[in-house]
Amino acid sequence: MILLGQGFSNIGDAFQFIASTTMLVKVTGSGLSAIIGIILSQLPSFLLSPFAGYLGDRFRAKNLCVIMDLLKSFVVLLFIGNNSSEKLYFLLFVLSIVDIVYSPAKRKLIICIVREKELLFTNSLITGVSGLAFLIGPVIAGWAVMKFSTDIAFFANCFLHILSTVLLLFIKSKNIHDSNASKNIKINKFDGVIADIKGGFKYFKSVPEIKNLLILSTVICSTGASINIAFFPFAFDTLRITEKQWGLMISIFNGTNFLAMLLAFVLNKKINKRMNIYIIISAIAISWIWFFYSITEKLNIILMLQFFEGTILAFCSILIGTRLQSVIKKSYMARVMSIGDIINNAGRIIGVSLAYILLGSYAESSVFLLNSILLFLFVFYKVIKS
């Protein structure tokens, strides 16, 4: 049920992403303005992550996921007929808040329905389903937007999220609470919430492996956000791609999640024994792919690089997510994951700011090159230090 629901919601999100970026490019007249607006509309929501983690650990994860799916299906309809960049950015901001609440709850729901030894397979399957969804979703969305209008994409997104909600209702899962948090809430609701959040931060700081994994994740998010900022104007303003080509690029990049799933399956036994080594190798490979972005403007080579980048990024994400779910105590899962969201989004702010400053004076290739070097040096430093 959760895999099928994930597939429906991912296809819907692919439709929404293609439609919203297309609308913003037309309204603002710039690929750079479009992607900056999209990313910045999401970043302020990192302030809500601690409360999202509290909600995920305090209440039933399935119920939160159902509510957020229904809310998203309603919000996407408000995009229809909007020609104001301010309104579009606001709606994207609202969707980002929904995602902030949804993300920790979904990750906790996974550990409530599978055993620890099944986590790698489960995360791989979820990534694979997401890959299939984003393989077909953006291409169909790009074709539909060109042939009809962006409205059809938002209607499709609404319908698919409703389907996802229905499937979630059939999932049977156990609920896991932090007993200390429950006691705090009985004494004083507000103080209990704050104590619950503080307890999550205290636990996060007490486990070095969790900190190291989340810091690496943040560096990848920060440099990746810079790459994304540069890639949009690179695609729309330098390469002058069409909506159909844009859909193809997104399909190739996200569709490789399926290949990452197969890779995780094949290497399953080796990965479980040396997961940290595979994470490091993946991060280094990503840095080299970004370097090659900086030295070419040929579309066929860029599509090939996207294929490799998408596969390795998804593979690395599977490994980091699985390792975190294995190390973190279940009663703290949503709160620690929300802390990860906070520092990841803070990293994205830094990455976006850096890219924006550089793009004011330099070509997109400079952003690709700099972030390639930064990621490589960070991973090299962690290897030497360990």
Image (spheres, grey):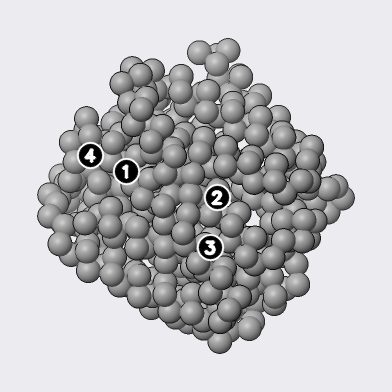
Q: Residue under label 4, please give it.
A: 330
Q: Given contact means CB atoms under 8 Å apart, are the residues at marks 1 and 3 in contact? A: no
Distance Cα–Cα, label 1 vs label 4: 21 Å
Q: What amino acid type should be assigned to the residue bearing mark 3?
A: Val
Q: Residue 139 carries which label?
A: 3
Q: What element carries label 2?
A: helix
Q: What amino acid type should be assigned to the residue bearing mark 2?
A: Ile
Q: Is mark 4 on a helix, strand or loop?
A: helix
Label 1: how many Cα within 10 Å (few below 14, some 14–19, many 20+): many
Give 161 or 330, whichever is nearer the viewer.
161
Disc nearest the viewer among 1 and 3 = 3
Q: Is mark 3 on a helix, strand or loop?
A: helix
Disc nearest the viewer among 4 and 2 = 2
Where is residue 95? Give x, y as percent. Answer: 46, 67
Q: Residue under label 2, please give it.
A: 252
Where is residue 25? Give x, y as percent. Answer: 69, 70
The residue under the point 79% across, 37% down is: 295
Q: Is residue 29 left or right of residue 142?
A: right
Q: Is mark 1 on a helix, strand or loop?
A: helix
Q: Going from the N terminus, do you reach mark 4 or mark 2 first? A: 2
